[in-house]
Image: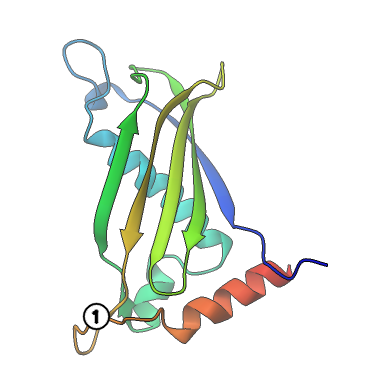
Amino acid sequence: MNDTPTLLTASADIEVPFHDVDAMNVCWHGHYLKYFEIGRAALLREFDYDYREMQASGYLWPVVEAHLKYVRPAVYGQKLEVRAQLLEHENRLKIGYEIFDRASATRLTKGYTIQVAVSAATQELQFVSPPVVFEKLERAWAR
């Protein structure tokens, strides 16, 4: 029997708004990070550690690295699915993302972000994820 917990995943649906596209009707590249954030928020809710919970636990989690790989453009009005998956949690939160066209399931973008824990009280970087992360994940895996 495998004792390795399954990776947590979540998805969120969005529609590309007019204010996110440029004159060529293509989504401006910086907005993909915003879409990643929407997926990340959905994922964090999956294990009851959204941004309010982070703050209440005494830790800040700044994004220290972001990587995007563009495959195809998103356009105004296009319905998208943002999928987020927790890849690492021991020393940092590494979350992988994929953005798909809802109608065709074509992948448009993929990437990841890395967040590290910082004590809200001392502003000190935590080299190991705080115990609250492990506690929340254990509860989520037990469901």
Of residue 10 and residue 79, the one placed in the foreground of this image is: 10
Of residue 5 and residue 23, the one placed in the foreground of this image is: 5
**Total numbered labels:** 1
Outermost residue toward the top in this view: 24
Residue 124 higher or lower than 20, as above or below? below
Within 10 Å of disc 1 (Cα), the crowding (few <14, some 14-19, many 20+) is some
Image position of 37 (left or right of 86):
left
Of residue 100 and residue 79, the one placed in the foreground of this image is: 100
Q: Amino acid at mark 1?
A: Leu
Q: Position of residue 91 (x, y in %)?
A: 39, 74
Q: Quadrant of residue 11?
A: top right
Q: Position of residue 47 (x, y in %)?
A: 56, 66
Outermost residue toward the front in this view: 1
Q: Quadrant of residue 128?
A: bottom left
Quarter in which the N terminus is drawn: bottom right
Q: Position of residue 18 (x, y in %)?
A: 27, 21
Image position of 115 (left or right of 106):
left
Image position of 104 (left or right of 125):
right
Outermost residue toward the right in this view: 1
Residue 87 higher or lower than 14, as above or below? below
Image position of 113 (left or right of 11):
left
Q: Residue at x 49, y 76 (%)?
A: 133
Outermost residue toward the left in this view: 23
Q: Residue at x 44, y 48 (%)?
A: 96
Q: Secondary structure at mark 1?
A: loop
Q: Residue at x 64, y 68 (%)?
A: 140
Of residue 49 and residue 125, the one placed in the foreground of this image is: 125
Residue 66 higher or lower than 138, as above or below? above
Quarter in which the C terminus is drawn: bottom right
Question: Which residue corresponds to mark 1?
Answer: 125
Q: Position of residue 93 (x, y in %)?
A: 40, 64
Q: Residue at x 26, y 17 (%)?
A: 26
